[in-house]
Image: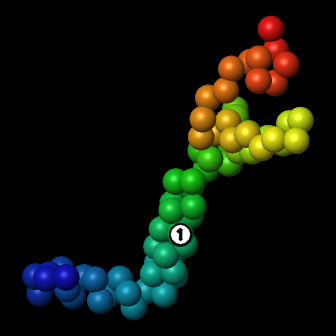
Amino acid sequence: MNLSPLNRRRFERFKANKRGWWSLWLFLILFVLSLGAELIANDKPLAVHFDGDWYFPALKRYPETTFGGP
């Protein structure tokens, strides 16, 4: 990073604040984890085992007749 002397000094002072520094890292980790939340918490299952076959509705759309629908 190419920071100005003023911003470099501000960044070093922020890093010296242990609670703020670890809170920033915790926030960044939680943010990155939340990017994958749509895969876990949605209206489509990730994988389905039906009649001996595996289906992945989160990745591909299947017609209702595949699962015994009208």
Residue lying farthest to the top in this orientation: 70
The residue carrying mark 1 is 29
Question: Which residue shows up at 81% across the image and 41% down it?
Answer: 53
Camera-nearest residue between 58 and 17: 58
* Residue 40, above or below 26: above
Q: At 89% from the left edge and 35% from the top edge, which residue is drawn?
A: 51
Q: Is residue 2 left or right of residue 63?
A: left
Q: Which residue occupies the foreground of this view, 23 or 69?
A: 69
Corner quadrant of residue 5: bottom left
Q: Does any portion of residue 27 appear in the rendered image?
A: no
Query: For mark 1, does the 10 Å Cα neighbourhood hold few (<14), some (14 to 19), or many (20 or more) residues?
Result: few
Q: Relative to residue 53, is residue 3 drawn left or right?
A: left
The image position of residue 16, as x and y in percent, is 39, 91
Tally of numbered discs: 1
Residue under the image location 70 percent in, 32 percent down? 43
Image x and y of residue 7, in percent = 18, 80
Q: Is residue 26 left or right of residue 43?
A: left
Q: Residue at the far left: name it.
A: 4
Q: Quadrant of the N terminus?
A: bottom left
Amino acid identity at mark 1: Ile
Q: Is 69 placed above or below 23 here?
A: above
Q: At which x and y percent is residue 56?
A: 69, 41
